[in-house]
Image: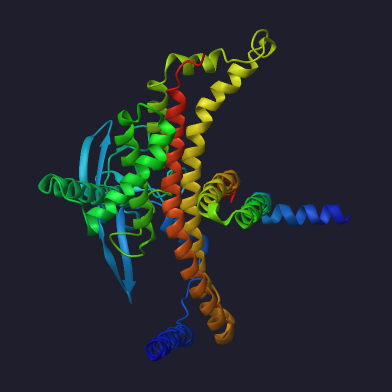
Amino acid sequence: MLATVLLQATLGMGLGKMGATIGAGLAVIGAGIGIGKIGGSAMESMARQPSAAGDIRTSMLIIAALVEAASLFAIVVCFLAL
Amino acid sequence: MKKRLILMRKIGLFILTLFLLVVANPLKAETKDAPLDIKGLIFEHIGDAYSWHITTIGKTDIGFNLPVIVHSSEKGWFAFSSGKLHSGQPYNGFYIAQDGKYAGKVVEKNSTGSEVRPVDFSITKNVLSLLISAFIVLTIILVVAHWYRKHPMEAPGGFVGMIEAVIEFVRDDVIKNNVGPDYKRFQPYLLTVFFFILVNNLLGQIPIFPGGANVTGNIAITLVLALFTFFIVNISGTKAYWKGIFWPDVPIFLKVPIPLMPALEIVEVFTKPFSLMIRLFANMMAGHTVALSLTCVIFATVSMGAAINSAMTVLAVFLSIFMFIVEILVSFLQAYIFTILSSVYIGLARAKKSH
């Protein structure tokens, strides 16, 4: 009973839009976890060896951009489904 | 000590004035008749257009119409100002489609009555911005090169020194390390792509003419840049590179009955430039979208009353300043990443036979 009511409501709203917004949220979770891990290990290693902080910071930014690209794939697909 | 106090007081006064200006404005915000279409507004700013609309003061639009240059397979070449196609009216059989597959683009009705796209060489907003940024890159590099020719044995300072530092940084840290011993052959392409992407990204962050066109956030332009890398990597691939794709150095069961590893390697040949294209496109488009959305928040909360509106305006202004700083970092970072990944791929393609 509840399922049919929900289904009718979602069909009215447009499943595509709902799928797009949920997909965007999931993609952000992935990016957040990935970049958080990179930042965490970068902080630890910078605390261990402050003299290498410059190199570590550069590598951290590069790897963060690469991880972000993966979640941006999903964002592009969500834009297409909007 | 006293100088620092005076400076701090001046900065505090400046921030307070900004704050008051930001809060005072929404109290006299006008209510428009049409509801605010945020999605349409954002897509209009991110997309391409046949005229460059700069601003609207009151009722007058300030901007200029760009030339439309089309070639129809039945009627031949036509070149005219896009002002003649304003608000959907046809000119010489061409008109801008309002909806459907070709919404927003110049179409014509061919002899069978169906809507087709003529071959379109128009100078659109993105094309004009591309030309402007190409001109800027050329000016910077040629002026710097001319200085070196005029002052043969001197150390540069000022602007020339800054450009030399950037070029040396890209050449030493990025190109030399990753391309390998024959880096000189690929250094012009890689340096050009770095400066091109950097200038286009930075120009896109400036909100007013000549900046503000979303060039690198347009997938056609990043597709062409990725295609350049694709062709350069594969045309200059050594025999060792191609052997590593079709007959890699892996255990025989991954190659012989079903070529698993070769298939994966061939897919990788295409996904590497594809990821380059998507990375640059999505990063720049997302940055523009966020900046536009923050500005739209101010207008979207007008109907909710003065208190919420001024609170959201303050929030939106500070977030916009923060996003602007992040976007400058992202502009540089994306140019750097495109260049370093291209040089890594070229370096892998120039791999010598390992013994």
Spot occupied by residue A15 in the image (x, y as percentages of width and height): 68, 50
For this rendering, which residue is in front, B43 or B71? B43
Q: Residue furthest right?
A: A1
At x 32%, y 35%, the residue is B187
For this rendering, which residue is in front, B154 or B38? B154
Q: Is residue B173 visible?
A: yes
Spot occupied by residue B86 in the image (x, y as percentages of width and height): 30, 57
Side of A72 relative to B40 (left or right): right
In the displayed structure, B200 sits above or below B111; it is: below
**Image quadrant occupied by the N terminus of chain B:** bottom left
Spot occupied by residue B31 in the image (x, y as percentages of width and height): 47, 80
Side of B77 relative to A24 (left or right): left
Side of A76 relative to B126 (left or right): right
Spot occupied by residue B332 in the image (x, y as percentages of width and height): 41, 52
Q: Residue furthest left?
A: B150
In the displayed structure, B31 sits above or below B259; it is: below
For this rendering, which residue is in front, B51 or A22? A22
In the displayed structure, A32 sits above or below B149; it is: below
Q: Is residue B114 visible?
A: no
At x 43%, y 86%, the residue is B8
For this rendering, which residue is in front, B169 or B234? B169
In the displayed structure, B304 sits above or below B169; it is: below
